[in-house]
Image (cartoon, rainbow, N blue to C red):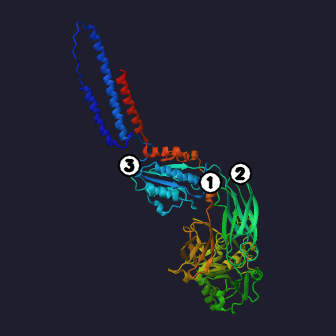
Amino acid sequence: MNFLYPGFLWALTALSIPIIIHLFYFRRYQRVYFSNVRFLREIKEETATRNRLKHWLVLLTRLLALTALVLAFAQPYLPDENATEQRASRQVSIFVDNSFSMDALGEDRSLFEQARDRARAIAEAYGPDDRFQLLSADLTGSQQRLLDQEAFLAALDELDLSPKTPTLEQVHERQRDALSRAEPGAAVAYLLSDFQRSIADFTPDTALAVNLVPLQGTEQRNLSLDSAWFEEPVQVRGQRASLNVRIRNYGSKDAEKTSVRLLFGEEVKALGEIDVPAGESVTDTLAFSIPEQGWPLGRVEINDYPVTFDDTWYFSFPVAGDVPVLVLGRPEGNPFLNTLFGNNALFRLENRPADNVDYAALGNNRLVVLDGLERLPSGLVAALNDFLENGGAVLVFPGESADASTYNSLLNSGGASLGERVTRTREVGSFNMENPIFRDVFASVPRNLALPAARLSYRLASGAMSREDNLMRFKDGDSFLGRFPVGRGSLYVCASPLTSAASDLPAQGGLFVPFVFRLAVVGSGDRPLAQIIGRDEWIDLGAGVQPALLSADQQPSVRLQDRLEFLPRVERSGDRIRIQVADQATEAGHYQIVMPDGAEAGHFSMNYDRRESQLEFWSRKELDERFSGSNTRVLTDDAGRLSADVSRISDGRRLWKACLIFALAFLGLEVLLLRWL
């Protein structure tokens, strides 16, 4: 047993006062003479014995009453197992989970509102001299400060739902950092959350008392629009496109006739209904016509309640028109490239021989293809290097008897070189699906996907300083198709000529067509349909951004309609110019990239992280088993019982009320003794 105010125990010295009074209290007797005092002597002896017993009992009750009264002022308490030590100022860290899953309904309101009420009860159970940390899913730098009780309650009232989804390991690390300067035993942490399985596991610190307050909703059901992607590798203006959308049912009941809508702006482009079995995902396809060139801003919507943050998926993509493609080779052109580009309204194809090129107009093209040239003129090499430096894309298919020295004058700028001519058949063993050129081409790699084989090829070598991005590789380890950054552009080199006799690459439409299409449309940059808020991802601005616009005092800005505008982090990585918005884009929607001169550099779309959609939680029993034996306990989520538990944790089991009751009881017993004995 400990005492909150042990200095009051000095008052126990006052117990000597009733003892002294009892010992030195002498009552004067009046002498009366009787003739026969034998019977009186017997009565006197009996009365004196009873008086002595009475006086000792009264003394005992007075001593006990005074002792209980002194103890009441000293405020004794029994320390709780995880209680903080009684000090002038304690430090308390309270994490309030404000992620989207906390928007689920509890018994009478959302779990987030319940968590705020519980956090308020916890803070009020401590004293005004204690210091508090309010931690949320945002994990901002300002939340590392310790606040007084009034400031904590004010900050708690301003807390709102957040798209961030940190793990509880990250949260607990922040709590340890904030409480690291507290005296031993004077710090305690609370975590109020629904404890989703995807984020809730953490390793508690044995030196810090941790208290978990699990909050559980009354109903666990949720439909999530997980993602969307195109079936076609390239979106062509005016043509029909198929957008695949995946919807997952995280609940325990089947979802029937769920409405799915595809919108561009406020115009509905496609409608559908879909049934989603419990615990499964279903993919639906929405067909629509690609709008005119520019940046179509679309979104897919479903109707679901009460968790609604994952009911919309935003996406955007560029639609190019009249993409200029220049093929240098035979005057009549390559039949494969003619079929690919010449019969498509998206492209403007031009075939020219290598000795009849307007070098000054080379930069007007999106893609330049060198097809089967035996040698490269020096003037063409110089012009192509300038084209690459300014952000262009060059695709090289060497001739069957190529002059390696002239080719290497171009390839060496990217750290590559054309080597030995190989006439034996070599098969391609792998391709890089993570490369932007092949990304999103396949929802999953087909098992029977045929890879090309080359009957005539060159050994494509890369130097020590090369930054090759390998796209396809032979089984013997040599590169079949690689990308080499040059300045702000990209040099793509194939180890084999583009002829049926040399390789069957043109016949592999599943790889060749999307590769060349995306290369022509995207150029040296690529941008995904959508990105996830909070992830440390970069957005490639592509080849159309001029370096002068990205100087130290000039950089692009990002806008979300009229609600949000900020300056992103800008980085030049090799030939690419990228921006990062992970910490600034906090709201789902379509963002516009604006250059300093007011020109638009495109859009990108952000969506909330779907980790919060998965409604699987740790139960109270599982939490008890998971953290048994550690300095961690699971508290009730009942408001009244929680306040009592927190008071016991903060102050232990206080006994001053019991001492006061005992003091009154002993005084009452003294009155009874004086009256009836």
Give the Cα separation between the discs numbered 1 and 3.
Answer: 39 Å
Q: Is residue 50 above or below residue 142?
A: above
Q: Nearer the viewer, residue 600 or 120?
A: 120
Is residue 10 rendered to the left or right of residue 532? left
Give the Cα separation between the discs numbered 1 and 2.
Answer: 16 Å
State the image quarter where residue 491 is shown.
Answer: bottom right
Mark 1 or 2, closer to the camera: 1
What residue does disc 1 label? 104
Whether residue 176 is visible = no
Q: Quadrant of the N terminus?
A: top left
On the image, the x and y values in percent for residue 639 come to 53, 46
SS state under label 1: loop
- N-terminal-most mark, 1 or 3: 3
Residue shown at 61%/72% (left/top)?
561
Q: Residues within 10 Å of mark 2 (few under 14, many from 20)?
A: some
Amino acid type at circle 1 is Ala
Q: Residues within 10 Å of mark 1 (few under 14, many from 20)?
A: many
Whether residue 229 is visible = yes
On the image, the x and y values in percent for residue 411 come to 61, 83
Number of numbered callouts drawn: 3
SS state under label 3: loop
Q: Is residue 28 above or below residue 503?
A: above
What residue does disc 2 label? 253
What residue does disc 3 label? 87
On the image, the x and y values in percent for residue 498 come to 72, 81
Amino acid type at circle 3 is Arg
